[in-house]
Image (spheres, rainbow, N blue to C red):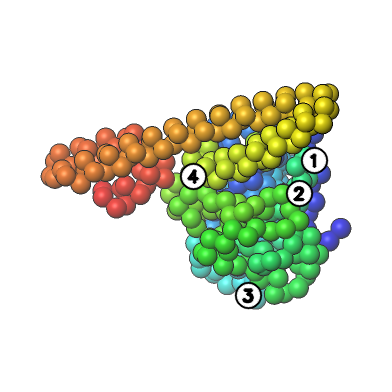
């Protein structure tokens, strides 16, 4: 087994989830897992790195490293702390949101560093549809996933795995060959993104707001238990293309009088059509909610003084404990 890669076999008894950068935001994490009905006895959670720094749930976050259902790749924040400690173990390191490190007893620091150093650079999750790759930042453009994990001991590749941003910043949709899905974090985006088969899951960079979680079995990204409407549209397009291909195959079977195969494929198409319809309902609901938000913001822009404050408070109450509330408070509060 390659030392920089952890391979997780299929989970026959439960579900697998991949979460964006946690940054010690454990309250948001546990709320999101509860909304998804996460079962610690059979489900697994895989994190894209940057477990540490910035947030308040330091001890709860560190405890995750000992949980049998929790797996995590190394992120650039873990690497910065490791490098700082190895260069000067006695230094009062607090850069990049690491003020928590100064509250840790000296006798515990080596153990924590050891845990962080043991984290792989990449994780492979076996699923019914193929390999789900997990890496903190990026995979070089044009490189297939098997080649990437095979060469991770190359310092240049490791640097891209921990620090790369080109794909997300440039919205490159070429994807990563050789994997069904590849989950990344590191680069903040206001909503989860699907760029080909690459899923970008860091939606707050450690600031206030919920976490994005990818459900491997459902092939959907959730934010606080609700399917993200923007990525749902991407996924819906993919499902419609698949439905069109399968319909063409069914027509060929019917023309060739292959009745048993035709019946099996017709059943498969019916199930796929139901899934597409359910996804469309989610997308439609998301569009309606966005339009309601736009209308409310328009009304807010026309108000002033006390009336504006009341409208803002009412709008924030509608979106309490969400990323929208945080943005409204910062921009207009």
Q: What element carries label 2?
A: strand
User: Are discs 4 and 1 less than 8 Å apart at CB?
Assistant: no
Q: What element carries label 4?
A: helix
User: Where, by quadrant of the figure, is residue 90 drawn?
Assistant: bottom right
Q: Farthest residue in the front direction?
A: 255
Judging by the rendered image, the residue that carries numbered circle 2 is: 131
User: Are discs 1 and 2 less than 8 Å apart at CB?
Assistant: no
User: Are discs 2 and 3 less than 8 Å apart at CB?
Assistant: no
Q: What element carries label 1?
A: loop
Q: Give the crowd class for mark 4: few <14, some 14-19, many >=20 residues within 10 Å.
A: some
Q: Which residue is at 38% across, 34% downward?
A: 288
User: Which of the two marks, 4 or 2, is nearer to us in this view?
Assistant: 4
Judging by the rendered image, the residue that carries numbered circle 4 is: 230
User: Which of the two marks, 1 or 2, is nearer to us in this view?
Assistant: 2
Q: Give the crowd class for mark 2: few <14, some 14-19, many >=20 residues within 10 Å.
A: many
Q: Earlier in the sequence, mark 2 or mark 3?
A: 3
User: Which of the two marks, 1 or 3, is nearer to us in this view?
Assistant: 1
Whole-angstrom CA distance, mark 4 to mark 1, is 29 Å
Whole-angstrom CA distance, mark 1 to mark 3, is 41 Å
Q: Which of marks 4 and 1 is nearer the N terminus?
A: 1
């Amino acid at each position: 087994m390659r030392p920089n890669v952890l391979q997780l076999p299929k989970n026959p008894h439960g579900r697998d989830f991949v979460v964006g950068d946690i940054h010690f935001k454990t309250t948001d994490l546990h709320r999101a897992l509860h909304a998804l009905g996460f079962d610690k006895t059979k489900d697994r959670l895989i994190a894209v790195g940057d477990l540490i720094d910035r947030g308040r749930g330091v001890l709860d976050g560190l405890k995750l490293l000992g949980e049998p259902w929790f797996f995590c790749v190394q992120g650039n924040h873990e690497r910065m702390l490791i490098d700082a400690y190895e260069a000067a173990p006695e230094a009062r390191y607090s850069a990049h949101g690491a003020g928590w490190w100064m509250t840790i007893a000296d006798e515990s620091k080596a153990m924590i560093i050891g845990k962080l150093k043991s984290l792989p650079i990449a994780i492979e999750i076996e699923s019914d549809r193929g390999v789900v790759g997990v890496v903190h930042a990026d995979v070089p453009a044009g490189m297939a996933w098997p080649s990437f994990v095979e060469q991770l001991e190359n310092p240049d590749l490791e640097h891209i795995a921990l620090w790369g941003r080109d794909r997300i910043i440039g919205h490159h949709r070429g994807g990563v060959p050789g994997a069904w899905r590849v989950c990344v974090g590191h680069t903040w985006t206001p909503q989860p993104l699907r760029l080909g088969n690459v899923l970008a899951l860091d939606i707050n960079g450690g600031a206030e707001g919920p976490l994005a979680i990818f459900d491997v079995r459902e092939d959907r990204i959730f934010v606080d238990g609700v399917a993200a409407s923007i990525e749902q549209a991407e996924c819906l397009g993919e499902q419609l293309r698949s439905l069109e291909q399968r319909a063409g195959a069914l027509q060929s079977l019917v023309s060739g009088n292959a009745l048993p195969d035709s019946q099996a494929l017709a059943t498969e198409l019916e199930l796929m059509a139901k899934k597409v319809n359910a996804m469309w309902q989610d997308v439609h609901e998301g569009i309606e909610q966005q339009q309601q938000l736009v209308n409310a913001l328009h009304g807010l822009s026309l108000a002033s003084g006390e009336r504006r404050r009341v409208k803002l408070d009412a709008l924030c109450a509608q979106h309490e404990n969400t990323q929208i509330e945080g943005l409204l408070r910062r921009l207009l509060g």
